[in-house]
Image (spheres, grey):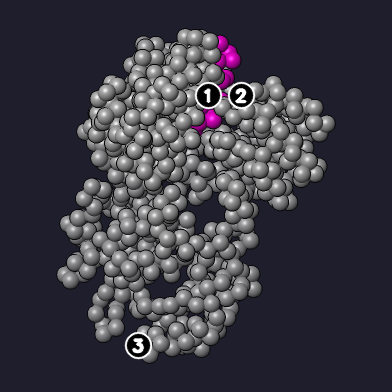
Amino acid sequence: MSILVTAHTKLLVQGITGSFGARHTQLSLAYGTQVVAGVTPGKGGQKFEKAVPIFDTVAEAVRQTGATASAIFVPPAFAADAILEGVDAGLDLAVCITEGIPVNDMVKVKRAMEGKKTRLIGPNCPGIVTPGEGPDSHGGCRIGIAPGYIHKKGNVGVVSRSGTLTYEAVWQLTCRGAGQSTCVGIGGDPVNGTSHLDVIKMFSDDPETHGIIMIGEIGGSAEEEAAEWIKQHCEKPVAGFIAGATAPPGRRMGHAGAIVSGGKGTAAAKIAAFKEAGIAVAPTPSEMADTLLKIMR
Amino acid sequence: MNIHEYQAKELLAAHGVTVPPGEVCDTPQAAKSIAERLFAKGDKVVVVKSQIHAGGRGKGTFKSGFQGGVKLCKSPDEVFEKASAMLGNVLVTKQTGLEGRLVRKILVAGAPPIKKEFYLAVLLDRASARPLMMVSTEGGMDIEEVAATHPEKIVKETIDPAIGMMPYQARKLARALGLTGDLISAGAKLLLGVYTTWWECDASMVEINPLCIVEALGGKEALVAVDAKIGLDDNAIYRHPDIQVMRDLGEEAPLEIEASKFNLNYIKLDGNIACLVNGAGLAMATMDIIQHFGGRPANFLDVGGGASKEQVTAAFRIILSDPNVKGILVNIFGGIMDCNVIATGIVAAVRETSLKLPLVVRLEGNNVKAGKATLAESGLTITSGESMADAAQRIVKLVS
């Protein structure tokens, strides 16, 4: 198994005809992902790449293709609406790649999603990859913008706020022969659909995941919450890294959520929480894979 | 985005929050005229406040030696004198750094006698993903210190974004501040106005410190927002053209403004090793690894996912405008973008800027072999790093 998605997951893409969405849909198709539908209002009836049917609404796409997951590539001003359209259509999973969504829009979305079955990943995230068994991990499920070829099917779960830092960890693992069960980028915004803790719980329950790399960064307290749970409940080896030890307080470091404010959310506090929970902390981002592999042996 | 106190008060007043009467100006003569009007309406004391985007103004010192960026005055002439000492001078506070900030504008406002000071703020509670209003009877104090030493003196109310702040929540907080009688409903109205300001303006934070019970004209007690600070969500600015125009470029670092024109996310730090990285997380991690190996990062610089040749060249130019920079570390994980395109961009940037400083490049990812070959065949002195750690160690050594 894996978490969230498998090679059989049927994916639809919201914003499939935009340049960003189109490019990454092509890459997902090339990776072997089951992209069964696209949604662009007004373009229903057309086909993407002569193969993937386009619908006007998510509800129609779901009804006619049985898609259960969505990749959202719509511009920031329309992203909240797109997420809730996916929720309304009864998707299991909505993965929102869009960067730059107003925080209050996400506050409303999160409130509106209470009690709904849809799980949101992101926004402002690289997405999810469950590697496949083919060459360069072909045949897996790639939702979002991560490079597929850096992955390898295996037993390490990776969860991170950051895109390129996730790729770094994944590539380090793959270069050392260690494959991944699923890699999840939860996004760098202050309000997101799925937290480190949510993903850690799933990895903890997934028999195919034997070890976990958790990558965090400054801002908020999500890493501390995950660490607390790991301390109490997680029996699998976990390695961690926190980015932003050198970030000045009060400044947003690229990600909207990466800010130390009022003395809260420092790297030092997060690293201390990791150590307290028995998580092996990588001393540098170059050693994320090695740190985990050392404790997995 | 941050705005000035006088702008924050304009936004609050537009949402029904009482602020002391006052006006902003940029000459001592105008300050004097504003003061004359305020005294004529019955104010006994008038305050002159330096408008800069940094806290600690009252206890700050001007580079001229003049003490205090906030001054109480009892006559229009005194206002003229204090305004002359502030305008066009550089104010250094605990938040500005040693370079301080040039005071271009001052707020001149009525300063009725203060009977009690409170603290009030609205912000996003990230853990619950809901707005949170917090109040404290410890007004005028550093709230972080109150939170550390007397957490029980901070009272919080979480707000359901589906219905907004309810009047009963505002009354609860008003009572928590010890308000009684007529001041309960006045306080509740003010608190609701502050929440509405936060929500309607897409603020990331509204802070009123102090919120005061003052003796208003005629001897009655009134609640007013004596100081105000508003931070705004950059992602939402596009839908607030009225707030966009409040941006004061004079308060922002020139290099950061230049970077934003090329969609580069640059933040200047005080070290000497510049870095150029794709992705915010990796960029932070690169700064960290430089420090880990004994170096000091000169900046945070995220060129984003699809760095173009133009962006890389602009990034080099910006990095090199910082006179502290003694070496550059480029760290690119080219997942989908072609490493050779990046390498070509780096070579072009090095030539265009006639780079003389040590440069270490760590490339990884798509088409990395061709990228490394392009760097090697350029004839330029570019050191290649095999891993992040290797690259960081090399640049630290080259710079020291």
Amino acid type, mark 2: Gly
Amino acid type, mark 3: Lys
Helix, strand or loop at mark 3: loop
Whether discs 1 and 2 lie on one chain: the answer is no
Whether discs 2 and 3 lie on one chain: the answer is yes
Badges 1 and 2: C-beta atoms under 8 Å apart?
A: yes
By secondary structure, the bulk of the magenta-drawn segment is best described as helix
Residue B25 in percent (x, y) is at 50, 77
Helix, strand or loop at mark 1: loop
User: Residue B376 has which mark?
Assistant: none
Residue A280 in percent (x, y) is at 49, 22
Badges 2 and 3: C-beta atoms under 8 Å apart?
A: no
> Can residue A2 be seen from the camera position used here?
no
Residue tagged 1 = A147
Which of the two residues, B15 or A280, is positioned nearer the viewer here? B15
Whichever of callouts 2 and 3 sits on the residue coming sooner in the sequence is 3
Residue A50 in percent (x, y) is at 43, 23
- Compared across the picture, whether B201 is left or right of B298 comes to left
User: Residue drawn at (49%, 14%), measured in percent from left and top?
Assistant: A138
Q: CA distance from mark 1 to mark 2?
A: 9 Å
Identify the chain of the residue marked 3, using the numbered disc in the image. Answer: B
Q: Is A32 covered by the magenta stretch?
A: no
User: Residue drawn at (45%, 13%), measured in percent from left and top?
Assistant: A139
Q: Is disc 1 surrounded by few (<14), some (14 to 19) or many (20+) residues within 10 Å?
A: many
Q: CA distance from mark 1 to mark 3?
A: 68 Å
Which of the two residues, B83 or B371, is positioned nearer the viewer here? B371
Identify the chain of the residue marked 2, using the numbered disc in the image. Answer: B
Which of the two residues, B155 or A291, is positioned nearer the viewer here? A291
Q: Is residue B320 above or below residue A295?
A: below
Residue tagged 2 = B365
